[in-house]
């Protein structure tokens, strides 16, 4: 086990999983009754299991001059997930392996630690669901994918932003992840969905074009473009071996996701069309991992953003 992993890892606690008990029969169960809290070092065969891993870090958001607070998201998400019902079609084998933290502003070291943790889960056959944290989670998550496999990785990013900014003074932020990944990939397979013109400079659009990125703007993400969007997804997924999905919660309109680092008043609406597209993606047999980023509990209203994130995670485990 690496020094970075030891220094930035906090084991899970079953005390984080509490809630109402309606009964002990299978049909009465809620997540807090079935989630197992296991130290990552003590896990062996994770085949077919969903593995929750927190990334309690928002140093990248701070460096990017965003609203701090996303480091609190993993714990908030556990609370929102605790009372979810266990559906008949869902597996009861959900594991919480704890959190990776960012100490002393050492973002890059925490990303390395996250990468090692993700790689361990993948190599043991598990499906990582990483609970961010700022969107600096992306590069750390990617490092883990690369440590676990040399296959062709494609990334679908639900986001209002490209996050393809070049690091200044070699310092990563929440907005540099995809630039960093592009530097390491011979062929960069990246599909951002929900991009907003008012949230990205022309330079970022130019950078995306330079790297051959095809994106879907928020204004075009509509049922009237359903055929075009489905064709784009099919073409993208067909070209890759493994699919990694990352969801930046600022992709959604503020009434649905007010608790984020950089809110978007006119983002995507999580309506039946969005859910159909999301479920189409997560049901791909090529999907190997997913994360959720930028939930900021300090700015959430009635836990709307946390509940929306929990809903998306619920759909993954239900697939």
Image: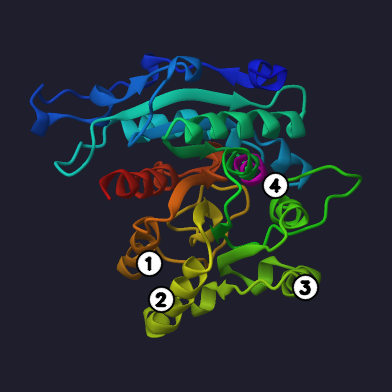
* Quadrant of the rendering where the N terminus is positioned: top right
Rounded to the nearest angstrom, the CA distance separating label 3 from label 1 is 27 Å
- Of label 1 and label 4, which has the lower sequence position? 4
Location of residue 188 in the rendering, given as x and y in whole percent from the top left corner? 67, 63
Which residue matches tag 4? 174
Asked whether the beta carbons under mark 2 and mark 1 sit within 8 Å of each other, the answer is yes
Task: Give the residue displayed 73% in from the left and 73% down from the top.
Answer: 205
Task: Specify the color scheme.
Answer: rainbow
Q: Callout 4 environment at 10 Å: few (<14), some (14 to 19), or many (20+)?
A: many
Left or right: 175, with 262 as reference point? right
**Depth check: 37 or 58 in front?**
37
Rounded to the nearest angstrom, the CA distance separating label 3 from label 4 is 21 Å
- Of label 2 and label 1, which has the lower sequence position? 2
Decide whether residue 139 is among the magenta residues.
yes
Q: Callout 2 environment at 10 Å: few (<14), some (14 to 19), or many (20+)?
A: some
Q: Is residue 158 visible?
A: no
Asked whether the beta carbons under mark 2 and mark 4 sit within 8 Å of each other, the answer is no
Q: Which residues are magenta?
A: 135-141
Q: Is residue 315 visible?
A: yes
Left or right: 20, with 78 as reference point? left
- Of label 2 and label 4, which has the lower sequence position? 4
Look at the numbered disc 3 and give the secondary structure of its residue.
helix
Left or right: 7, with 247 as reference point? right
Which residue matches tag 1? 277
Rounded to the nearest angstrom, the CA distance separating label 2 from label 3 is 24 Å
Q: Callout 3 environment at 10 Å: few (<14), some (14 to 19), or many (20+)?
A: few
Which residue matches tag 3? 210
């Amino acid at each position: 086990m690496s020094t970075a992993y030891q220094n930035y890892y906090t084991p899970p606690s079953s005390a984080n999983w509490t809630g109402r008990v309606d009964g002990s029969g299978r049909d009465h169960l809620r997540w807090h009754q079935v989630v197992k809290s296991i130290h990552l070092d003590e896990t062996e065969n994770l085949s077919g299991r969903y593995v929750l891993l927190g990334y309690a870090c928002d140093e990248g958001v701070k460096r990017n001059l965003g609203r701090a607070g996303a480091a609190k998201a993993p714990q908030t998400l556990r609370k929102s997930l605790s009372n979810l019902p266990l559906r008949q079609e869902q597996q009861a084998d959900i594991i919480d392996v704890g959190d990776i933290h960012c100490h002393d502003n050492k973002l890059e070291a925490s990303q390395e630690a996250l990468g090692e943790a993700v790689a361990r889960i993948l190599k043991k056959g598990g499906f990582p669901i990483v609970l961010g944290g700022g969107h600096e989670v992306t590069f750390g998550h990617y490092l883990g994918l690369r440590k676990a496999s040399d296959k062709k990785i494609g990334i679908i990013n639900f986001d209002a932003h490209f996050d393809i900014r070049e690091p200044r003074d070699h310092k990563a932020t929440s907005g540099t992840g995809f630039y960093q990944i592009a530097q390491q990939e011979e062929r960069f397979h990246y599909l951002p969905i929900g991009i907003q013109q008012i949230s990205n400079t022309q330079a970022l659009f130019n950078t995306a074009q330079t790297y051959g990125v095809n994106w879907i703007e928020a204004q075009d993400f509509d049922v009237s473009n359903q055929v075009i969007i489905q064709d784009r997804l099919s073409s993208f997924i067909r070209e890759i071996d493994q699919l990694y999905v990352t969801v930046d919660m600022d992709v959604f309109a503020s009434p649905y996701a007010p608790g984020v680092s950089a809110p978007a008043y006119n983002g995507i609406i999580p309506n039946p069309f969005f859910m159909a597209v999301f479920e189409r993606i997560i049901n791909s047999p090529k999907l190997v991992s997913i994360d959720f980023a930028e939930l900021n509990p300090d700015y959430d209203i009635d836990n709307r953003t946390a509940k929306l994130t929990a809903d998306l995670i619920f759909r993954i485990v239900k697939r």
